[in-house]
Amino acid sequence: MYYGGDYYPEQWDEATWVDDVRLMREAGVNLVSLGVFAWARIQPEEGAFDFAWLDRVMELLHDGGIGVDLATATASPPPWAHEKYPEMLPRDVDGHVVGPGSRQHYAPTSPVYRRLAAELVTALAGRYADHPAVQLWHVNNEYGCHLHQDFSDSARDAFQQWLRDRYSLIDAVNEAWGTDFWSQRYGSFTQILPPRRAPYSHNPGQLLDFRRFTSDALLECYRAERDIIRAAGATQPITTNFMGAFKPADYWAWAQEVDVISDDCYPDPADPESFRESAMARDLMRSLKPGVPWLLMEQSTGALNWRPSNAPKAPGQMTATSMQAVARGASGILFFQWRQSRAGAEKFHSAMLPHAGTSTRIWREVVQLGASLAALPALPDPDTVADDEHPRVAIVFDWHSWWAIENPDHPVTFDYLPLVRQWYAALHRAHVTVDFVRAESDLSGYAGVFAPALYLLSDDGAASLERYVEGGGHLLVTTFSDVVDESDRFRPGGFLTRLGPLLGVRLEEFGALLQTDAPPAAPGQRTARVTLASGEAFDGTLFAEQLELDGATALGTFTSGRTAGLPAVTSRASGKGRAYFVATMPDAAGTDALCRIVFEAAGVQPLVAGLPLTVEVSRRGDVLFLVNHGAETVTVEVSAETVVLEPYGSAVLTAR
């Protein structure tokens, strides 16, 4: 189990380096990320490299038994680079230069940036590929974090080439985007620009493809650096840090390119439900590369610096979220950062070693966590096979639907991620194991699959979902799904053209509901009341779709508004399985009730029954983890064993 954090010795004198290694050993640290933002120190000017200081740090760490996750330092170009090559700077949607003085001030498609980055990585890899301290390579840092999209001329040129590679012919672009609308038909690829500021709405196909291009362009940067490292003879694993469910980058595609998934996760300790959000991030990381342990590359020991209000973590809370990550497949727990910075934009960001030193609660918890991780039993790789007693469920998570949904000009403006989180929270409250999948994935191992707002659905995805149900699976699809094809175009026949026959319903109108932040005097319906056959009732938001049954049975009916009396929740048997449709976005009571319906039909049971909502349970092979995320002591029964969990306490048991 790796344990440590980001280390920035360039911010400190050499005497402090020696003290750092001593304290790292005391805390049980065995891995640090080194050089993440050290480009200016490693290369003080073009063509000149200074490795002497880095050599000394590497030697100190290695002699102290501490491994290095060596970063390529390309996330923040030095001042000499933008002074000499101002064309490498990115531009925003209005065409304004995004200047230096922070970080990530580069256009990912800039030929100059890519050349300079390649020269730096070539020098680093050539020097340290065989260094005994290097356990891992860390390419760049949080790709796309602050600069979600670049609209520079280099992005224009690269986007045009990306379109040539994807479509070959300009007429294929015109067909995919429907450019005869508004006289947008293109005669050549050179006429196509990034979707910069325009008088009104952009073409939705162009917006979607520019999202795809942006993710691919960032991935090209990663691949280029990775390939240089490999060419230098390095055999260590190579990674770059993800950021949970991060919109700009399609991590399904990225996961195929990294040796190990690593993630940065910063749940808000002031939010009592934040542990569900972090659990979702852990399960997503585990799902991106099934069966392979992942790394929690960054988290905080306490308060942050970048929220409007930065609450500290309660005593034990840092350990609880760390054990949550281990339980859900992590093979390393790391922090930003090792020693708290004295200057710079993140000087208020907490660290393993705080400004106040080793007489602090944070330091004591850091040392205790290191000991706890070292004392863990040998853990198997994350399990992807469910047993008969505890079948798994999955959520379809689709970046392309996310991008397309959040384009403008839809019946309702809404965010995709909160809807996914709402369904995840319901499954988490039920204490079942949740994987994330693509619609095109092999779903045969899951008892239940939930597809919230699968707006953009490919033919392959639809066929996969149909096979899953026919083979015995239970599929729940929500409103605003199967609306368009992969180019964001309607298929002939309207809505639900691919899944409608499987679901046994026809959709006539979306029935948009008012958003909750609409003006109080705004006329119209804000929620749609739904009553299930069991008598349970809940409120739906966003949509109250007008459905017509076409082979399905109504399990719930709208009981308010213009759709009163129409089906709201439906079910249809198909082959050996069953498909469900929900014609609105249920509230928490609704998601819980609908999960129970699917669980009962699919035979899904919790890993441990009767747990309080603040306690989560995860299984990793034959090891069972219980984590209490509440501020009160709770007592639970697990296989006739009484377990007492202190506030933010955890227990590691042998699964029976």
Image: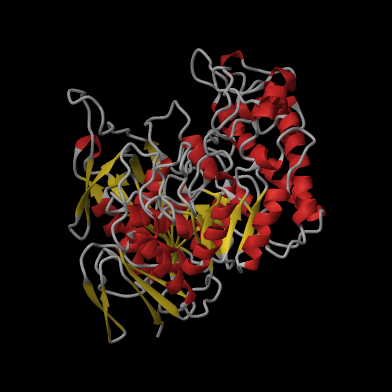
> Is there any visible trace of residue 478 in the rendered image?
no
Q: Residue at x 53, y 58 (%)?
A: 20
User: Who is closer to the viewer here, 618 or 266?
Assistant: 266
- Asked if one can make out residue 451 in the rendered structure from this viewpoint, the answer is yes
Query: Which residue reaches farthest front?
Result: 15
Q: Residue 553: where, in percent of width, then height?
A: 33, 55
Residue depicted at 63% across the width and 45% down the height? 140
How many tags in the picture?
0
Above or below: residue 579 compared with residue 634 = above
Q: Front-most of 219 and 465? A: 219
| Quadrant assignment, res 305 | top left
- How far across and down, in percent of the image, does residue 155 sit? 67, 27
How is this picture coloured? secondary structure
- Residue visible at 19% across and 44% down? 559
The quarter of the rendered structure image containing the C terminus is: bottom left
- Camera-side residue: 200 or 357? 357
Residue 503 screen position, x and y as percent:
43, 52
In the rendered image, residue 537, in percent from the top left (x then y), is placed at 19, 52
Q: Nearer the viewer, residue 221 or 459?
A: 221
Q: Is residue 257 left or right of residue 551?
A: right
Q: Is residue 474 shown left or right of residue 131?
A: left
